Amino acid sequence: MSLQGKTAVITGSNSGIGLGIAWEMAKAGADVVINSFTDRPEDHDLAAQIAKETGVTARYIQADMSKASACRALIEQAGNCDILINNAGIQHVAPIDEFPEDKWDAIIAINMSSAYHTTAAALPKMRAAGWGRVVNIASAHGLTASPYKSAYVAAKHGVVGMTKVVALETAQEPITANAICPGYVLTPLVEAQIPDTMKEYNMSREDVVKNVMLTRQPSKEFATVEQMGGTAVFLCSDAAAQITGTTISVDGGWTAL
Ligand code: NAD
């Protein structure tokens, strides 16, 4: 699968799933734009490392995905945008009657509205290029719910709904829109929680992973960022040209339960 000549813009990609997708896109030959709200030397270093190891053009563009104008500016600054991966996301956990309003607004803005702004800015570029792929990183929580995650579940269900609309609006064009719905993915953030949880429950690493973290993931294994990247690359392949408006769960069976 070669994505040579394509440019992929991945929001929220200086760590975790977004960074994993950026690497897989670059390995498949796409030029990549990685992004977050920070502007540190190490952010730019990530792009330089991807470029050095894969030979593609890789740039880091700072843009705060909680702000409409910054979302649109990211796409403008990217130049070409053949592949748009909406991945930026945050989480906050609290009962709905105690859920802080500012957290609600931030989660809706970053996890959902940013995908509207970037998609609106990117579609004219895809149309001009005669090819495009929108891949939204939703979640198992875009299809099911858990208590205390009202804003996250609302935003992720919203992303899944918007994905279907974008697919219908582009159905007769060489553009597709799909959502990947990950289960629990082993990101640095998740890995960092394991030692504390081991101490808290006096459990082995294996028990924490299987019986605390992965209670809802029947495979009892984390999904990986490489698998998210591989799924995104597949959605950009010719084999996926008629796959549009749907969700692909990469969740070890979570949503089959
Ligand atoms: P992460 O915290 O490693 O990555 C989130 C990324 O978003 C980071 O690069 C962060 O800098 C960026 N970001 C946060 N706020 C931003 C803002 N205002 N502007 C721009 N960038 C911003 O977490 P992750 O697990 O890699 O999550 C990535 C996506 O995958 C999220 O949308 C998340 O909801 C989704 N997801 C993760 C899991 C999981 O188990 N890790 C499961 C399902 C879905």
Image (cartoon, helix red, strand yellow):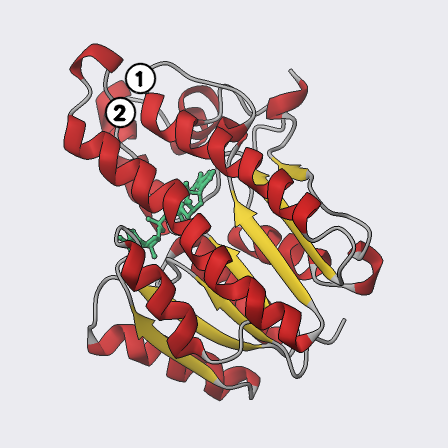
Say few, some or many: other residues with alpha carbon within 10 Å of mark 1 (under 14 / 14 to 19 / 20 or more). some
| Residue 82 visible to the viewer | no
As drawn, 110 above or below 78:
above
Horizontal and vertical percent position of residue 195: 28, 37
Q: Quadrant of residue 105?
A: top left
Q: Amino acid at mark 1?
A: Tyr
Q: Residue 73: tell me if it is visible.
A: yes
Measured along the vertical axis of the image, is residue 228 above or below residue 149? Answer: below
Q: Is residue 46 left or right of residue 64?
A: right
- Closest to the observer, 131 or 14: 131
Q: Nearer the viewer, residue 2 or 119?
A: 119
**SS at circle 2:** loop
Q: Which quarter of the rendering shows the N terminus?
A: bottom right
Left or right for 95, reference 156: left
Q: Marks 2 and 1: in contact by CB < 8 Å?
A: yes
Q: Residues within 10 Å of mark 2 (few under 14, many from 20)?
A: some
Disc on res. 148: 1
- Give residue 93's mark: 2
Question: Residues under labels 1 and 2: Cα distance?
Answer: 5 Å
